[in-house]
Image (cartoon, rainbow, N blue to C red):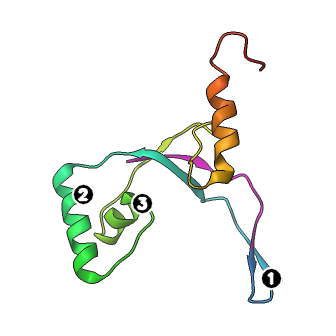
Amino acid sequence: ATVAVPVTDTLKRGDGEHRVIGSVDREWLWSIQTPQAFRLDLLVDAHVRARNEGISATDDASLIEHLGRPVQLVMGDRRNIKVTTRDDLPMAEYLLTLGQPGAAP
């Protein structure tokens, strides 16, 4: 299972010249968050198989999908942001202050 929120942004496909070539229907799209939870034996199997097959993935859920196993989506919270780059840090720091006494809403 993985925590996720429905995609609300408008999504566009682009070409090599950075021009819009179409819109993406977001009705069934989810933005994946953490944590992700899987049985240990299944997760180890997924990682071993991915390594052996030269498969790269950005998360464990993708590797479980590659095994052909279902991944359950569990409703998340938009404040549960993923900190991947330095650009994500100001928002993470702001969200962390929200629970502090005297913090502005």
Q: Is residue 74 magenta?
A: no
Type of residue at label 3? Asp
* Residue beneath the point at 22% across and 73% down: 49
* Residue beneath the point at 80% across and 82% down: 18
Picture layout, residue 45 above or below residue 18: above
Q: Which residue is mark 2?
A: 43
Which mark, by number, is residue 18?
1
- Which segment is the magenta one? 1-12
Q: How many neighbours does mark 3 have within 10 angstroms: few (below 14), some (14-19), or many (20 or more)?
A: few
How far is the residue under mark 2 from the one under mark 3?
Answer: 11 Å
Q: Is residue 9 magenta?
A: yes
Rendered location of residue 44, percent (x, y): 20, 60
Which one is earlier in the sequence, the residue at label 1 or at label 2?
1
Which mark, by number, is residue 59?
3
Which one is earlier in the sequence, the residue at label 3 or at label 1?
1
Asked if the residue under mark 2 is in contact with the one under mark 1, i.e. CB atoms within 8 Å, the reply is no
Rendered location of residue 88, percent (x, y): 65, 48
* Residue beneath the point at 66% across and 24% down: 97
Rendered location of residue 17, percent (x, y): 80, 89
Which one is earlier in the sequence, the residue at label 2 or at label 3?
2
